[in-house]
Each structure stands twice: as C-alpha cells, then as structure tokens.
Amino acid sequence: MSERRAKPFSITAMPGFATIAILAFVLLYVPIITMVIYSFNASNSVALWGGFSFRWYAIAWENDTVQEATVRSLVIAVSAALIASTLATLAALGTTRRKKFKGQTFVYVMINQPLMVPEIVTAVALLIFFAAIKKATGYTGLAYLILAHSAFCVPFAYLPIRARLEGMDLTLERAAADLYATPFQTFRRITLPLMAPGIAAGAMLSFVISLDDVIITEFVKSAGQDTLPTYMLGQLRRAVTPEVNAISTALLGLTVLLLTAFFLLTRKRG
C-alpha cells in the first residue's frame, strides 16, 4: 500500500483567507476610489455630491499658488532623483562589484538606515543640521530641501540598482578585460548599459518618494517654500474643498504611471 502524501501547505486554503483578502482590498482602495470620484464633484462640499464636473481641476490649474508649489515640487523631486541615483549607483558598484570585505554588512545597514529609522527622526536630525548651516551662512534657499530629499532617497534608489548588479553575470566584463579594454571602457560600454534599467528604476522610485514627502519637507523648508503636499496639508487645516481631491487624484495618476514603469523595468524577463 502506497503511503498517503501530505498536501503541500497553501495559505490560500486557510479558513477565512478570502474574507481577509477582500477586506484588506476594500480598506485600501475604497477610500482612494471615493477620493477620485469626489474630485469630479460640482459641489463645494467634499461630502455631498452635486453632479459631475471638471470644475475643481480647472480651479486647481488656474491657482497660482498650486502652480508655484507644483513647479517647486518637480524641481526638488527631479534634482533629488538625479543626486540620489548617482550616489546610489556609486554605492552599489562599491558594494557588489568586488570581493566581500570586512564590515560589508555594516555598510549595507548604514546605506539603508533611512528605511529603518522613523522618518520623523530623520527629519529632526536634518532640521538641526541645516539650521546650524543656515545660521552660519545666512542662506535659506531651496538647496536644503534638495539635499534633504536626496539623502532620504538614496536607499530607495540603491535597492533596485544593487539588485540589478547582483543579477548581472561578470562574464562579459571579464571578456572585455581579456580583450584589453580599460576599466573605464568596460564600465561605459558593458556595465553601465546593463545596469541602466536599475538606475532608471531607482531614479523613478526616488522621484515618487520625493514628490510625495511631507514630514521632511515640513521640518526643513523655509518660509515660502511650500511643495504640493505641504500646500495640501495647509489647505486641510483651513477650508477643505474638492480642489484637494483634484490635486490628490492628479498626483495619484502620476505616481501610478511611474510605479508601472518601475515594475516594467525591474521585472525579470524570460
């Protein structure tokens, strides 16, 4: 008589799995869908439906303060993405394209530290650091926000770049060395093109993180340096209108597009 084999464990076969999964999706997405629907509300109320209209999108589009905050947010996010992805690329090359070294785990921990520490702690640390520089130099420009966002975004850019490098075979680089290519030529013609999708993914993820950031921006910014998220936070403290829903929906659409591109760049092929 053949022995009866035990069925492999499957989380989907557990009692109540479907109910919990449906409840999780409802809690996650129903509020977002509701916000998107009410961004087309013709009424002045955020809770009472007054008919379908693009009114609040037009109002947000023509709002000078929203335009200034949007441009400022994009400048900071693009700058932070470029700086963070550059630093993350160098860090990933230094920690993956070499033999294992003593203290490598400590280096990983230090690079990923902003991911493990509560954001409020990072924000307070940056506030103290930049406040001392502001007092010493008298400069209160946008560079502080760019540097703060860049520092916070480095680990987010580092993760996909490092993953891309770890998945790359060293054969082509060794073949280039055998053909007398210099280290720079090997990097420019082989390593960099192969890791380009990881760099692009890291830059896009950094852009999204910077664009949506509120806590660090609130602590570091000077007067008159509101970004789009901090402007929306200020509006919520005053009279709340569906204009906030319209701006949030536009940000949601941009984020979904970028995260979709991030997924397409980082998914495994074949």
Image (cartoon, rainbow, N blue to C red):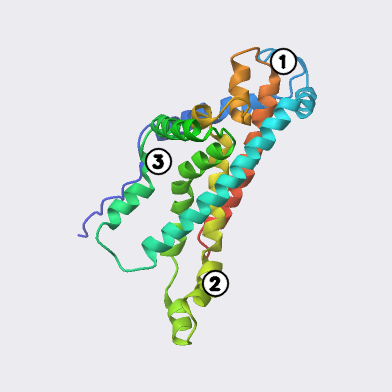
Q: In this view, does 196 lie above or below 51?
A: below
Q: In this view, does 137 lie above or below 197?
A: above
In the image: residue 214, left or right of residue 6: right
User: What is the CA distance from the residue labelled 1 to the residue labelled 2?
Assistant: 57 Å
Picture coordinates of residue 205, whole percent (x, y): 54, 47
Decide which of 114, 24 is in the foreground and name it: 114
Q: Check disc 2 and report the residue beneath it.
A: 188
Q: Do the residues labelled 2 and 3 touch (CB within 8 Å)?
A: no
Picture coordinates of residue 235, whole percent (x, y): 63, 18
SS at mark 1?
loop
SS at mark 3?
helix
Q: Residue 239 carries which label?
A: none
Q: Check disc 1 and report the residue beneath it.
A: 49
Dot 3: within a 10 Å radius of its alpha carbon, few (fewer than 14), some, or many (20 or more) residues? some
User: What is the CA distance from the residue labelled 2 to the residue labelled 3?
Assistant: 30 Å
Who comes first in sequence, dot 1 or dot 3? 1
| Residue 166 seen from this side | yes
| Residue 38 seen from this side | no
Q: Which amino acid does label 3 sit on?
A: Pro
In the image: residue 270, left or right of residue 13: right
Q: What residue type is labelled 1?
A: Trp
SS at mark 2?
helix
Q: Check disc 3 and report the residue beneath it.
A: 114
